[in-house]
Image: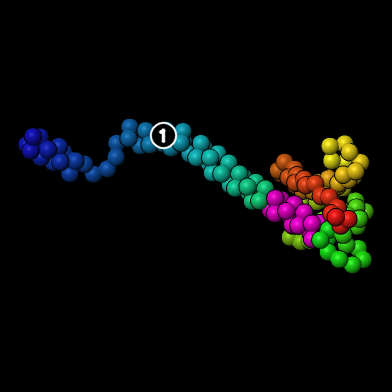
Amino acid sequence: MLLLFRKFSAKIGERDGFTLIELVMVIVIASIAFPSMITMYTSVYTNSHNAEFMTAASLLAIEQMEIILADKAGVGAGYGYAAITNEKYAAVNPPAPFNVFTRTVNVVNVNINGDPAYPAKQITVTVNHSKIPSVIIQTLITDHSGL
């Protein structure tokens, strides 16, 4: 076995370069692998940006919902359950650098279980961006001030 290894290593040491067949094989393999690698890297780059946009849109929706819930809990003029209306939150688009997103709020008066004795408001916050699906957060609030 050792003799075979010595003969093989001696032949490798005698070579000064690559043969034409070896060079052609490397070119063929590289021409097959390189385009698929470029496609994979492009896909990874695009998807990483989409994930970043989804995260930002989710955080913008949560931020707006927290503002609305804080307004419900607030006291004074312009705060409280009755002050939560579509008109109050009509222009809620985020500032730069997030102004590539659009944020809308929809407030709908509903009755829990269809009973007018239990009024509530369904609040829907939607954040849109051209490269991702819409991010939607909904909640239901009630007025417990009379209890």
Instruction: Please name the residue that numbered disc 1 is placed on.
Output: 29
Is residue 145 shown to the viewer in this render? Answer: yes
- Estimate the x, y position of residue 45 in percent, counting from the top left: 58, 47
In the rendered image of this protein, does residue 98 appear above or below residue 121? Answer: below
Q: Residues within 10 Å of mark 1 (few under 14, many from 20)?
A: few
Please say whether residue 59 is one of the residues in the magenta stretch: yes
53 to the left or right of 12 = right
Furthest residue in direction left, as rendered: 3
Question: Which amino acid, mark 1?
Answer: Ile
Give the position of the N terminus as an image quadrant: top left
**Front in this rendered view, residue 55 or 71:** 71
Q: Residue at x 91, y 57 (%)?
A: 83
Please say whether residue 61 is one of the residues in the magenta stretch: yes
- Estimate the x, y position of residue 73 in percent, counting from the top left: 81, 61
Q: Residue at x 91, y 55 (%)?
A: 82
- Estimate the x, y position of residue 103 in percent, counting from the top left: 80, 51
Magenta highlight range: 56-70
Furthest residue in direction bottom, as rendered: 76
Q: Secondary structure at mark 1?
A: helix
Is residue 106 shown to the viewer in this render? Answer: no
- Estimate the x, y position of residue 71 in percent, counting from the top left: 83, 60
